[in-house]
Amino acid sequence: MNPTDIRNPDYFHKVVDCQWACPAHTPVPEYIRLIAAGRYDDAYMINWDANVFPGILGRVCDRPCEPACRRSRVEAEPVAICRLKRVAADYKSDIKARLPQPASTKNGKRVACIGGGPASLTVARDLLPLGYEVVVYDGASKAGGMVRSQIPKFRLPESVLDEETDYILEMGATRRFDTWVNSLKDILAENYDAVFVGTGAPRGREADVPGRKEAGAHIHIGIDWLANVAFGHIDKIAFRVIVLGGGNTAMDCCRTAKRLGGTDVKVVVRSGFDEMKASPWEREDALHEGIEIHNFLVPKEFKHTDGKLTGVLFEKVKAEYDAKGRRNLVPTGEPDVLMECDAVLVAIGQENAFPWIERDLGIEFDKWDMPVLDPATLQSSLPRVFFGGDAALGPKNIITAVAQAHEAAISVDLFCQGKDLKQRPAPRTNLASQKMGIHEWSYGNNVTLDHRHKVPTLDLQKSLANLRNEFELGYDAKLAFAEAERCLNCDVQTVFTSKLCIECDACADICPMDCITFTQNGEEADLRSRLKAPATNVEQAIYVSDGLQTGRVAVKDEDVCLHCGLCAERCPTGAWDMQKFFLENSHAGQQS
């Protein structure tokens, strides 16, 4: 194998698995160390720079970082990365003085952001300090978009949402709320230099089965029902409720129904329990609240009497897989299942809807009625119109919307300056030794044996009594410190200088994970098999040194390294060093 080129920032970036997995590339270990040090303001600002909404995401993020956490490779559960983000938000002081202030000089460019959700707000946040006039349109009276209308208050308090959206709006955004945009042509006629579309996926999928029309008064689309609850139009529901669907929206629907008077609330899913799209913790919370989840059932008919819903008839199915591993649901042949109910909430998916975009503007749409975009720049076929979030590439999650909006803001900035959109700014990176003495480092390198600490929750009876009572209470400072200490500091890298090595093998002897080997070089598959502990995870790179005096190479398996620094402490010549890698993702204006 060729020696590892650590000058390529992607190498160490991929070793910081949590940050690599985060769509916005939040520097996770850095802010966790700051939390352990009690520096909550600094931890919050690290988050705010990358993911924009630390308090919101610390409660409702889909957590793509956590399955990637290296801690789960040495024990069952990852570090509670998401809930530590909330700690930074909950314990920070007033950080307004640290936020960008409204630009004192405008650059003469005007940008419209359609939709007041996380994507549009991220674009506004990135462009406002550069002197752009940013106008945010939304049909609601307050910012937040579908985060405000669809995430229940017992998961995300309104005060947290208001605080973090106001941080952006107070940077000088022009608010055109209570304004329903029904024509992109009219927006373009206002001579904006660029338009960003961040309208989400606002249409819930329909359950087109017999009886839907006749019993329609008692059957509701989940996202519309949640919005009506959020804005106070609905404050109660029938006792017996069935929720169709297995995603996070379905979990929000069933848990909300439980708080609005539903005493018998069931979730019915066509897939198996493990295949449900809902996050595992969302399913656990629903089960904790006494909600039944039934799997492998497909709705066949809505039963009704004189327009009054009486139940849903389901067909039993099972999963079969073809030669390519694709799943098909086929009937089992068992008798149908009738579940009695008084109301049904349909939460089987969301779709994009662009009836307000005229088809003669030059924006190309594909066969799924989605805009055809350059995936790198998010620019449409009408050059001054850009998309981001669920409106761009289909429904995903908040953190993906933020990440796409950062990229779209870069594109808007380059476009308005007349520059090549493909020439995008590189992320800022740094690699610095953490050595403070012969055997001392500027980070805590002891590996705690603690298992994941459970987040305290409100008493169930109190939680179910009021829709606005936040269910999760969050970590206190003591628990936050203990959980932060579980982080393995994967951004503090072992950096090897081959010319200093005397091949004493002391580092290999002391390594608690047997991840360092001195051996003859070879092809990757062969080399992986000859390590002290074979490196079987081919998704994670192995670190290969230059040739040593004996002709051998030093090889380290990045997959199981604990970043404990024992190799560097033991090395008599300082050939190993612990160096902190920091990556700050690129934003608009960074090229200047």
Image (cartoon, grey):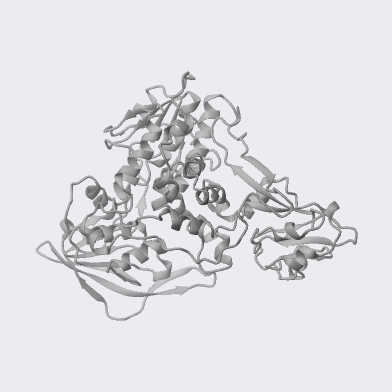
Q: Position of residue 586 (x, y in %)?
A: 57, 38
- Quarter location, residue 461: bottom left
Question: Looking at this rendering, what residue extends furthest in the left direction?
Answer: 306
Left or right, 511 with reference to 399: right
Q: Position of residue 286 (x, y in %)?
A: 32, 64
**Camera-side residue: 352 or 440?**
440
Q: Is residue 8 above or below residue 264?
A: above
Q: Is residue 152 among what the camera can see? A: yes
Residue at 65% across / 47% down in the picture? 581
Which quadrant: the N terminus? bottom right
Question: Looking at this rendering, what residue extends furthest in the bottom direction?
Answer: 334
Question: Looking at this rendering, what residue extends furthest in the right direction?
Answer: 550
Q: How many marks?
A: 0
Q: Is residue 208 among what the camera can see? A: no
**Camera-side residue: 240 or 59?**
59
Q: Position of residue 350 (x, y in %)?
A: 35, 52
- Quarter location, residue 475: bottom left
Residue at 71% across / 71% down in the picture? 533
Q: Is residue 270 above or below residue 426?
A: below
Q: Position of residue 37 (x, y in %)?
A: 52, 49
Residue at 51% across / 59% down in the picture? 79
**Camera-side residue: 147 or 343?**
147
Which quadrant: the C terminus? top right
Residue at 76% across / 61% down in the picture? 555
- Quarter location, residue 137: top left
